[in-house]
Image (cartoon, grey):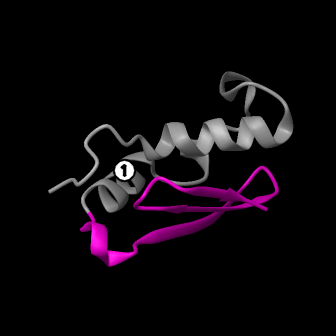
Amino acid sequence: MSHMSQFDPVGAVLTAVAAKEGTTPEALSPPLADVIEPDALDRLLRESPAESNAAVLFNYRGHAVVIDADGDVEIN
């Protein structure tokens, strides 16, 4: 089961993208759910064993987004 029960992958991505763009998560459009299935992202990263080094890479708003099971988000 989860090694980081408080970890919110969707929130982490939205916060990181908004910070990169100098805006708020609420102002981002299109919704993240139009790009990636939020429940699947949550399940994959929350339920991965800490030692698995699981990470997800996808594009959102013209950025390459990488988020790992430790909650680290990289926006390029």
Q: Residue at x 40, y 72 (%)?
A: 54
Membership of 55 in magenta stretch: yes
* Above or below, 58 relative to 25: below
Please tell me which residue lies in front, 70 or 28: 70
Q: Residue at x 78, y 49 (%)?
A: 61
Q: Residue at x 14, y 57 (%)?
A: 1
Q: Is residue 51 visible?
A: yes
Quadrant of image for the C terminus: bottom right
Q: Quick one: label 1, few (<14), some, or many (20+) residues within 10 Å?
A: some
Left/right placement of residue 32 relative to residue 24 reads left
| Quadrant in the rendering for residue 5 | top left
Give x and y (percent) for residue 25: 67, 28
**Residue at the left extreme of this rendering:** 1
> What kind of element bears circle 1?
helix
* Above or below, 62 relative to 38: below
Membership of 43 in magenta stretch: no
Q: Residue at x 59, y 45 (%)?
A: 13
Residue segment shown in magenta? 48-76
| Quadrant in the rendering for residue 51 | bottom left
Left/right placement of residue 35 relative to residue 64 reads left
Q: Is residue 31 visible?
A: no
Instruction: Please name the amino acid that badge 1 sits on.
Output: Asp
Residue annotated with mark 1: 42
Give x and y (percent) for residue 14: 62, 38
Left/right placement of residue 38 relative to residue 74 reads left
